[in-house]
Amino acid sequence: MPPSIIPPSTPQQHSHTSLRRIPKKPRNILQNPQQRPTIKWTPLNTGKSELYLPLTFPTGQTFRWKQTGPLQYTGSIGSNLVSLKQLENDDVGYFFHNEGFASGEAEAGLFDFLNMGISLSELWDGFRACDERFCELAEYLEGARVLRQDPLECLIQFVCSSNNNIQRITKMVDFISSKGRILGSVEGFDFFEFPTLDRLALVSEAELREAGFGYRARYIVGTVAALQAKPGGGVNWLASLRKLDLQEAIDALCSLPGVGPKVAACIALFSLDQHHAIPVDTHVWQIATRYIIPELAGTRLTPKICNRVADAFVSKYGKYAGWAQTLLFIAELPSQKALFPSSFWSSEERGSGKLENEKSRGKLNTD
Ligand SMILES: Nc1nc2[nH]c(O)nc2c(=O)[nH]1
């Protein structure tokens, strides 16, 4: 089964089946559709070529944001609860649900999270100029931006992601998130501040196992304990990885339980400013052998070959190669393939593409 990215028209509300249901919230925001106030969106003053929400939020880099309306996504950034909407003029509007929030600080947090200091359209102009394949895909997938997430949130999400599909990862991440402070509810979804390390440390392996985490329960508990043992604190330690070279950051992350090279590269790319981190697994390797290094087709994906694949991406796309990889990754998701005319993909690409491979059963991060 290919992974299911939640389709735009069917937001999955409270889909905690095997995982414990989140208790009812104490605070309701925009809950009753009849009384729903009209949101006054503040424009980000950006366009679709810089940020297109459906290609940025439900495509495997965060599992914490929910679709709360047509072209609308809601999530928390620190202690702020924010909705984003692609407006009719292709700009993005934002709305903070918090009462009495300090707008300047909250907005700065939002721009930081959206990585707005980096011009996606300029990067893509460069990628288009050096790669015909990128050019073809980019026509259909404009605005697939790389986020700059909080490192702890990103780390825990990607420990859950290992050998797992998007739906199940989302349930696990919802369970862990529910240990944080509740911020409110939008369209039937509860939103929480991500739990602090101290709060996470109170969650036992048995509780996670009970909640359906399987072997990942031990990794979460082990990673939290390893972070707590860092001199100066785990949050500072994670933040310090933003200043390291990519390989040093990857090595440091791989010292944590449940973090292998692919998961480490995802965390590095999506939270640590390591823009040329290339998450390589069997799926990405297939993309690479089709379009970038055909000479490696038929080889076995050893750690050495993983490094060669990553190097090939960086040689082709340069310092922001991770941003280019993101587009190639998204293009292979079944939900996004539907955006292309059927004549676009060859039968080989349609049938054996990343994440549609029967053997993967829709699993991400199969390292
Ligand atoms: N851009 C990418 N996003 C991902 N999410 C995920 O789980 N794996 C990947 C990936 O390889 N690239």
Image: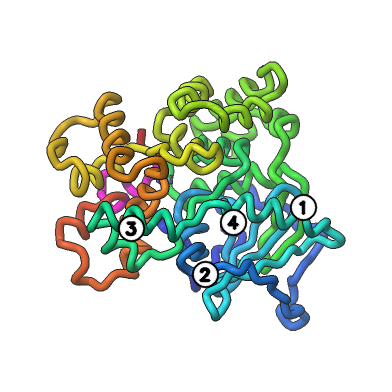
- The quadrant of the rendering that contains the C terminus is top left
Which of the two residues, 278 or 301, is positioned nearer the viewer here?
278
- The quadrant of the rendering that contains the N terminus is bottom left
Q: Using the numbered discs, state the Cα–Cα distance from disc 2 to disc 4 in whole angstroms.
A: 21 Å
Q: Which residue is mark 3?
A: 331
Nearer mark to the viewer, of 1 and 3: 1
| Element under disc 2 | loop
**Which numbered disc, 1 or 4, marks the residue that appears first in the sequence?**
4
Which of the two residues, 82 or 91, is positioned nearer the viewer here?
91
Q: Using the numbered discs, state the Cα–Cα distance from disc 2 to disc 3 in whole angstroms.
A: 20 Å
- Lateral position of residue 40 relative to residue 5, left or right: right
Circle 2/circle 4 CB separation < 8 Å: no
Circle on res. 47: 2
For the stretch drawn in magenta, the main secondary structure is: loop
Q: Is residue 363 magenta?
A: yes
Circle 1/circle 3 CB separation < 8 Å: no
Q: Which residue is mark 1?
A: 105
* Magenta part of the chain: 355-364
**Which numbered disc, 1 or 3, marks the residue that appears first in the sequence?**
1
Q: Which residue is mark 4?
A: 65
User: Where residue 256 sits: x, y (%)?
Assistant: 53, 23
| Element under disc 3 | helix
Numbered disc total = 4
Q: Using the numbered discs, state the Cα–Cα distance from disc 4 to disc 3 in whole angstroms.
A: 20 Å
- Lateral position of residue 171 relative to residue 191, left or right: left
